[in-house]
Image: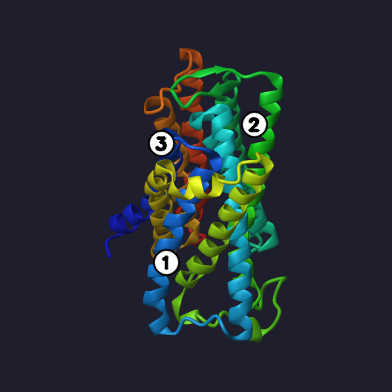
Amino acid sequence: MPQFLNIFIGLVPSVGYGCMAPFSTKIGGSVQQKTLGITLSCFILSLIILAIEIPFGLDYFSKAGMLFFFISLISGVFWYFGSFFELKAITQAGVSKAMPFSMVGQFFVTTLFSAFLFQGWLHNPKIQISFGMIFLIIIFLGILLISASPNVSYSEKGGIASMNEKSKWGFLISILFSVIAFAMYFLLPELIKELSNKGSWFYSGEEWKNPNDKLFLSGFDKGIMFPQSLGMLLCALIGIIIYSKKQNQPQFLKNSLLDKKTFLNMIPGSLQAIGNLATIFSIYLNGNAIASPLNQMSVVIATMFGIFYLKEKKEKPYMTMTFIGLSLITIGSLMSGFYGTIIGLN
Protein backbone atom coordinates (compact mmCIF):
# COMPACT_ATOMS: atom_id res chain seq x y z
CA MET A 1 0.00 0.00 0.00
CA PRO A 2 1.43 3.45 -0.92
CA GLN A 3 2.85 5.41 2.02
CA PHE A 4 0.59 8.41 1.41
CA LEU A 5 -2.46 6.14 1.71
CA ASN A 6 -1.14 4.77 5.02
CA ILE A 7 -0.81 8.33 6.34
CA PHE A 8 -4.30 9.17 5.04
CA ILE A 9 -5.72 6.21 7.01
CA GLY A 10 -3.68 7.42 10.00
CA LEU A 11 -5.45 10.78 9.84
CA VAL A 12 -8.95 9.24 9.88
CA PRO A 13 -8.96 8.79 13.70
CA SER A 14 -8.01 12.44 14.23
CA VAL A 15 -10.93 13.53 12.03
CA GLY A 16 -13.32 11.23 13.93
CA TYR A 17 -12.10 12.30 17.38
CA GLY A 18 -11.76 15.97 16.41
CA CYS A 19 -15.29 16.25 14.97
CA MET A 20 -17.06 14.20 17.63
CA ALA A 21 -17.06 16.72 20.49
CA PRO A 22 -18.00 19.83 18.41
CA PHE A 23 -20.88 18.01 16.70
CA SER A 24 -22.13 16.58 19.99
CA THR A 25 -21.95 20.05 21.53
CA LYS A 26 -23.93 21.51 18.63
CA ILE A 27 -26.63 18.83 18.97
CA GLY A 28 -26.97 19.59 22.67
CA GLY A 29 -28.62 17.58 25.43
CA SER A 30 -27.37 16.72 28.90
CA VAL A 31 -23.89 15.28 29.42
CA GLN A 32 -25.59 11.96 30.28
CA GLN A 33 -27.56 11.95 27.00
CA LYS A 34 -24.48 12.83 24.95
CA THR A 35 -22.44 10.06 26.56
CA LEU A 36 -25.24 7.51 26.09
CA GLY A 37 -25.67 8.36 22.41
CA ILE A 38 -21.92 8.10 21.77
CA THR A 39 -21.58 4.79 23.62
CA LEU A 40 -24.57 3.28 21.78
CA SER A 41 -22.82 3.89 18.44
CA CYS A 42 -19.57 2.37 19.70
CA PHE A 43 -21.43 -0.67 21.05
CA ILE A 44 -23.30 -1.29 17.79
CA LEU A 45 -20.06 -1.17 15.77
CA SER A 46 -18.37 -3.50 18.27
CA LEU A 47 -21.16 -6.06 17.80
CA ILE A 48 -20.58 -5.96 14.04
CA ILE A 49 -16.82 -6.42 14.52
CA LEU A 50 -17.46 -9.23 17.04
CA ALA A 51 -19.64 -11.12 14.55
CA ILE A 52 -16.87 -10.83 11.94
CA GLU A 53 -14.06 -11.86 14.31
CA ILE A 54 -15.65 -14.89 16.03
CA PRO A 55 -15.21 -17.20 12.99
CA PHE A 56 -11.50 -16.31 12.96
CA GLY A 57 -10.94 -17.73 16.43
CA LEU A 58 -11.66 -14.85 18.78
CA ASP A 59 -11.30 -16.39 22.25
CA TYR A 60 -12.58 -14.85 25.50
CA PHE A 61 -12.91 -18.15 27.40
CA SER A 62 -9.32 -19.19 28.09
CA LYS A 63 -7.52 -17.99 31.24
CA ALA A 64 -5.68 -15.29 29.31
CA GLY A 65 -8.80 -14.52 27.26
CA MET A 66 -10.83 -13.78 30.39
CA LEU A 67 -8.11 -11.45 31.67
CA PHE A 68 -8.05 -9.78 28.22
CA PHE A 69 -11.85 -9.34 28.38
CA PHE A 70 -11.85 -8.00 31.96
CA ILE A 71 -9.02 -5.49 31.47
CA SER A 72 -10.60 -4.34 28.20
CA LEU A 73 -13.96 -3.86 29.94
CA ILE A 74 -12.32 -1.83 32.73
CA SER A 75 -10.57 0.34 30.13
CA GLY A 76 -14.04 1.01 28.66
CA VAL A 77 -15.22 2.10 32.13
CA PHE A 78 -12.36 4.61 32.22
CA TRP A 79 -13.36 5.81 28.73
CA TYR A 80 -16.83 6.63 30.07
CA PHE A 81 -15.44 8.77 32.88
CA GLY A 82 -12.95 10.40 30.52
CA SER A 83 -15.72 11.32 28.06
CA PHE A 84 -18.12 12.40 30.80
CA PHE A 85 -15.67 14.87 32.32
CA GLU A 86 -14.42 16.03 28.90
CA LEU A 87 -17.99 16.84 27.83
CA LYS A 88 -18.56 18.54 31.18
CA ALA A 89 -15.41 20.64 30.66
CA ILE A 90 -16.73 21.64 27.23
CA THR A 91 -19.95 22.95 28.80
CA GLN A 92 -17.78 24.94 31.24
CA ALA A 93 -15.28 26.48 28.81
CA GLY A 94 -16.15 25.56 25.22
CA VAL A 95 -14.60 23.17 22.72
CA SER A 96 -11.76 25.47 21.65
CA LYS A 97 -10.34 25.59 25.19
CA ALA A 98 -11.39 22.25 26.70
CA MET A 99 -10.30 19.93 23.87
CA PRO A 100 -6.64 21.07 23.63
CA PHE A 101 -6.27 20.73 27.42
CA SER A 102 -7.90 17.29 27.48
CA MET A 103 -6.22 15.78 24.42
CA VAL A 104 -2.74 17.13 25.03
CA GLY A 105 -3.02 16.17 28.71
CA GLN A 106 -3.78 12.61 27.59
CA PHE A 107 -0.82 12.70 25.21
CA PHE A 108 1.50 13.88 27.99
CA VAL A 109 0.44 11.22 30.47
CA THR A 110 0.30 8.29 28.03
CA THR A 111 3.63 9.28 26.44
CA LEU A 112 5.43 9.51 29.78
CA PHE A 113 3.92 6.25 31.07
CA SER A 114 4.71 4.42 27.83
CA ALA A 115 8.20 5.95 27.77
CA PHE A 116 9.24 4.93 31.28
CA LEU A 117 6.77 2.39 32.71
CA PHE A 118 6.61 0.40 29.46
CA GLN A 119 10.26 1.27 28.61
CA GLY A 120 9.48 3.03 25.33
CA TRP A 121 12.32 5.53 25.90
CA LEU A 122 14.75 3.11 27.50
CA HIS A 123 16.05 1.38 24.35
CA ASN A 124 18.34 4.33 23.54
CA PRO A 125 17.72 6.52 26.62
CA LYS A 126 20.10 9.43 25.98
CA ILE A 127 18.67 10.26 22.57
CA GLN A 128 15.06 9.23 23.23
CA ILE A 129 14.69 11.04 26.55
CA SER A 130 16.44 14.18 25.25
CA PHE A 131 14.34 14.46 22.08
CA GLY A 132 11.16 13.28 23.83
CA MET A 133 11.39 15.92 26.56
CA ILE A 134 12.18 18.69 24.04
CA PHE A 135 9.01 17.94 22.08
CA LEU A 136 6.91 17.63 25.24
CA ILE A 137 8.15 21.09 26.29
CA ILE A 138 7.13 22.47 22.86
CA ILE A 139 3.65 20.98 23.33
CA PHE A 140 3.47 22.44 26.85
CA LEU A 141 4.32 25.92 25.50
CA GLY A 142 1.48 25.51 22.99
CA ILE A 143 -0.94 24.76 25.81
CA LEU A 144 0.26 27.80 27.77
CA LEU A 145 -0.48 30.04 24.80
CA ILE A 146 -3.98 28.59 24.36
CA SER A 147 -4.69 28.92 28.08
CA ALA A 148 -3.60 32.57 28.11
CA SER A 149 -7.00 33.71 26.82
CA PRO A 150 -9.46 34.94 29.48
CA ASN A 151 -11.46 32.31 31.33
CA VAL A 152 -14.81 31.80 29.65
CA SER A 153 -17.99 29.82 30.05
CA TYR A 154 -19.66 28.22 27.05
CA SER A 155 -23.22 28.73 25.84
CA GLU A 156 -24.84 26.13 23.57
CA LYS A 157 -26.57 29.01 21.79
CA GLY A 158 -23.14 30.14 20.61
CA GLY A 159 -20.49 32.49 21.92
CA ILE A 160 -18.70 32.69 25.22
CA ALA A 161 -19.02 34.67 28.42
CA SER A 162 -16.98 35.44 31.52
CA MET A 163 -16.03 32.59 33.82
CA ASN A 164 -15.84 33.19 37.56
CA GLU A 165 -13.21 31.72 39.88
CA LYS A 166 -15.47 28.85 40.98
CA SER A 167 -16.19 27.87 37.37
CA LYS A 168 -12.47 28.07 36.57
CA TRP A 169 -11.61 25.51 39.25
CA GLY A 170 -14.55 23.34 38.18
CA PHE A 171 -13.18 23.34 34.63
CA LEU A 172 -9.66 22.41 35.77
CA ILE A 173 -11.00 19.56 37.95
CA SER A 174 -13.06 18.23 35.02
CA ILE A 175 -9.99 18.32 32.75
CA LEU A 176 -7.84 16.57 35.39
CA PHE A 177 -10.34 13.73 35.85
CA SER A 178 -10.78 13.46 32.07
CA VAL A 179 -7.03 13.21 31.44
CA ILE A 180 -6.48 10.57 34.14
CA ALA A 181 -9.43 8.45 32.98
CA PHE A 182 -8.52 8.62 29.28
CA ALA A 183 -4.89 7.79 30.09
CA MET A 184 -6.04 4.61 31.86
CA TYR A 185 -8.27 3.81 28.86
CA PHE A 186 -5.25 3.92 26.53
CA LEU A 187 -2.70 2.35 28.90
CA LEU A 188 -4.63 -0.71 30.11
CA PRO A 189 -4.64 -2.40 26.66
CA GLU A 190 -0.88 -1.79 26.53
CA LEU A 191 -0.59 -3.55 29.90
CA ILE A 192 -2.24 -6.65 28.37
CA LYS A 193 0.56 -6.89 25.82
CA GLU A 194 3.27 -6.29 28.43
CA LEU A 195 2.17 -9.29 30.55
CA SER A 196 3.61 -11.68 27.95
CA ASN A 197 6.55 -9.50 26.85
CA LYS A 198 9.74 -11.09 28.19
CA GLY A 199 11.56 -7.76 28.10
CA SER A 200 8.91 -5.99 30.18
CA TRP A 201 8.85 -5.24 33.90
CA PHE A 202 5.29 -6.66 33.88
CA TYR A 203 6.20 -10.02 32.34
CA SER A 204 4.06 -12.70 33.99
CA GLY A 205 4.79 -15.73 31.83
CA GLU A 206 3.79 -17.16 28.46
CA GLU A 207 0.45 -18.31 29.91
CA TRP A 208 -0.73 -14.69 29.73
CA LYS A 209 -0.04 -14.41 26.02
CA ASN A 210 -3.02 -12.92 24.23
CA PRO A 211 -5.01 -15.87 22.81
CA ASN A 212 -5.95 -13.73 19.79
CA ASP A 213 -2.35 -13.21 18.67
CA LYS A 214 -3.11 -13.86 15.02
CA LEU A 215 -5.37 -10.78 15.17
CA PHE A 216 -3.12 -8.78 17.47
CA LEU A 217 -2.03 -5.51 15.84
CA SER A 218 0.88 -3.83 17.65
CA GLY A 219 -0.81 -3.84 21.04
CA PHE A 220 -4.37 -3.28 19.80
CA ASP A 221 -6.81 -5.98 18.81
CA LYS A 222 -10.17 -5.82 17.10
CA GLY A 223 -11.41 -8.17 19.82
CA ILE A 224 -10.88 -5.40 22.37
CA MET A 225 -13.72 -3.27 20.98
CA PHE A 226 -16.61 -5.38 22.32
CA PRO A 227 -15.60 -5.53 26.02
CA GLN A 228 -14.51 -1.88 25.91
CA SER A 229 -17.79 -0.66 24.44
CA LEU A 230 -19.73 -2.91 26.82
CA GLY A 231 -18.01 -1.19 29.75
CA MET A 232 -18.80 2.21 28.20
CA LEU A 233 -22.49 1.41 27.69
CA LEU A 234 -23.01 -0.11 31.15
CA CYS A 235 -21.47 2.96 32.79
CA ALA A 236 -23.57 5.31 30.66
CA LEU A 237 -26.78 3.53 31.75
CA ILE A 238 -25.70 3.39 35.41
CA GLY A 239 -24.75 7.09 35.26
CA ILE A 240 -28.22 8.04 34.03
CA ILE A 241 -29.88 5.93 36.75
CA ILE A 242 -27.77 7.58 39.47
CA TYR A 243 -28.45 11.04 38.01
CA SER A 244 -32.21 10.40 37.83
CA LYS A 245 -32.29 9.35 41.51
CA LYS A 246 -30.13 12.30 42.55
CA GLN A 247 -32.41 14.74 40.71
CA ASN A 248 -35.54 12.86 41.87
CA GLN A 249 -36.55 12.33 38.23
CA PRO A 250 -37.49 8.61 37.97
CA GLN A 251 -38.50 9.03 34.31
CA PHE A 252 -35.12 10.48 33.29
CA LEU A 253 -33.71 7.12 32.15
CA LYS A 254 -36.77 6.37 30.01
CA ASN A 255 -36.87 9.91 28.67
CA SER A 256 -33.16 9.83 27.87
CA LEU A 257 -33.46 6.53 26.01
CA LEU A 258 -36.34 7.90 23.92
CA ASP A 259 -35.11 11.48 23.58
CA LYS A 260 -34.27 12.72 20.08
CA LYS A 261 -31.00 14.29 21.27
CA THR A 262 -29.76 10.93 22.55
CA PHE A 263 -30.26 9.39 19.12
CA LEU A 264 -28.81 12.43 17.34
CA ASN A 265 -25.70 12.06 19.51
CA MET A 266 -25.25 8.63 17.95
CA ILE A 267 -24.08 10.50 14.82
CA PRO A 268 -20.96 11.99 16.48
CA GLY A 269 -20.77 8.70 18.39
CA SER A 270 -20.33 6.90 15.06
CA LEU A 271 -17.38 9.23 14.36
CA GLN A 272 -15.85 8.12 17.67
CA ALA A 273 -16.46 4.47 16.78
CA ILE A 274 -14.94 4.86 13.30
CA GLY A 275 -11.98 6.65 14.89
CA ASN A 276 -11.46 3.71 17.27
CA LEU A 277 -11.53 1.21 14.39
CA ALA A 278 -9.31 3.34 12.15
CA THR A 279 -6.76 3.59 14.98
CA ILE A 280 -6.36 -0.19 14.88
CA PHE A 281 -5.54 -0.16 11.15
CA SER A 282 -3.35 2.93 11.50
CA ILE A 283 -1.22 1.22 14.17
CA TYR A 284 -0.96 -1.87 11.96
CA LEU A 285 0.05 0.13 8.85
CA ASN A 286 2.14 2.94 10.38
CA GLY A 287 3.26 1.63 13.77
CA ASN A 288 2.49 3.18 17.15
CA ALA A 289 5.23 5.82 16.86
CA ILE A 290 3.55 7.42 13.83
CA ALA A 291 -0.12 6.55 14.52
CA SER A 292 -0.22 8.21 17.96
CA PRO A 293 1.11 11.64 16.85
CA LEU A 294 -1.22 11.60 13.82
CA ASN A 295 -4.11 11.16 16.27
CA GLN A 296 -3.08 14.40 17.98
CA MET A 297 -4.21 16.34 14.90
CA SER A 298 -7.67 15.95 16.45
CA VAL A 299 -6.64 18.79 18.80
CA VAL A 300 -6.35 21.17 15.85
CA ILE A 301 -9.55 19.95 14.19
CA ALA A 302 -11.62 20.21 17.39
CA THR A 303 -10.27 23.66 18.24
CA MET A 304 -10.89 25.03 14.74
CA PHE A 305 -14.43 23.66 14.78
CA GLY A 306 -14.96 25.28 18.18
CA ILE A 307 -13.79 28.68 16.93
CA PHE A 308 -15.47 28.79 13.52
CA TYR A 309 -18.39 26.32 13.73
CA LEU A 310 -19.48 26.97 17.32
CA LYS A 311 -18.56 30.70 17.15
CA GLU A 312 -16.21 30.57 20.16
CA LYS A 313 -14.22 33.52 18.84
CA LYS A 314 -11.87 35.53 21.05
CA GLU A 315 -10.26 38.95 20.82
CA LYS A 316 -7.60 39.19 18.10
CA PRO A 317 -4.48 38.93 20.35
CA TYR A 318 -5.85 35.79 21.98
CA MET A 319 -6.89 34.30 18.63
CA THR A 320 -3.31 34.80 17.41
CA MET A 321 -1.92 33.15 20.55
CA THR A 322 -4.34 30.25 20.09
CA PHE A 323 -3.20 29.64 16.51
CA ILE A 324 0.48 29.84 17.52
CA GLY A 325 -0.24 27.42 20.36
CA LEU A 326 -1.96 24.99 17.98
CA SER A 327 1.04 25.21 15.63
CA LEU A 328 3.42 24.32 18.48
CA ILE A 329 1.19 21.41 19.51
CA THR A 330 1.15 20.15 15.91
CA ILE A 331 4.94 20.41 15.55
CA GLY A 332 5.63 18.82 18.95
CA SER A 333 3.15 15.97 18.43
CA LEU A 334 4.32 15.07 14.94
CA MET A 335 8.03 15.37 15.70
CA SER A 336 7.67 13.20 18.81
CA GLY A 337 6.52 10.41 16.53
CA PHE A 338 8.66 11.00 13.46
CA TYR A 339 12.05 12.03 14.94
CA GLY A 340 13.11 8.40 15.41
CA THR A 341 12.62 7.75 11.70
CA ILE A 342 14.34 11.02 10.74
CA ILE A 343 17.52 10.35 12.72
CA GLY A 344 17.53 6.64 11.94
CA LEU A 345 16.41 5.11 15.27
CA ASN A 346 13.40 3.32 13.76
Q: Is residue 255 left or right of residue 260?
A: right
- Measured as percent of width and height from the top left, residue 326 is found at 48, 32
Q: Which residue is mark 3?
A: 27
Q: CA distance from mark 3 to mark 1?
A: 34 Å
- Measured as percent of width and height from the top left, residue 249 is found at 61, 41
Q: Nearer the viewer, residue 233 or 101?
A: 233
Image vertical order of residue 273 relative to residue 24, above or below: below
The residue type indicated by label 2 comes to Phe
The residue type indicated by label 3 comes to Ile
- Measured as percent of width and height from the top left, residue 104 is found at 57, 41
- Measured as percent of width and height from the top left, residue 167 is found at 66, 25
Q: CA distance from mark 2 to mark 3?
A: 21 Å
- Which label sits on residue 3? none
Q: Quadrant of the N terminus?
A: bottom left
> Could you tell me if the residues under marks 2 and 3 are in contact, i.e. CB atoms within 8 Å?
no
- Chain-order first, disc 3 or disc 1: 3
* Residue 220 seen from this side: no
Image vertical order of residue 297 relative to residue 94, above or below: below
Question: Regarding mark 3 in the picture, which secondary structure is present there?
Answer: helix
- Which label sits on residue 171? 2
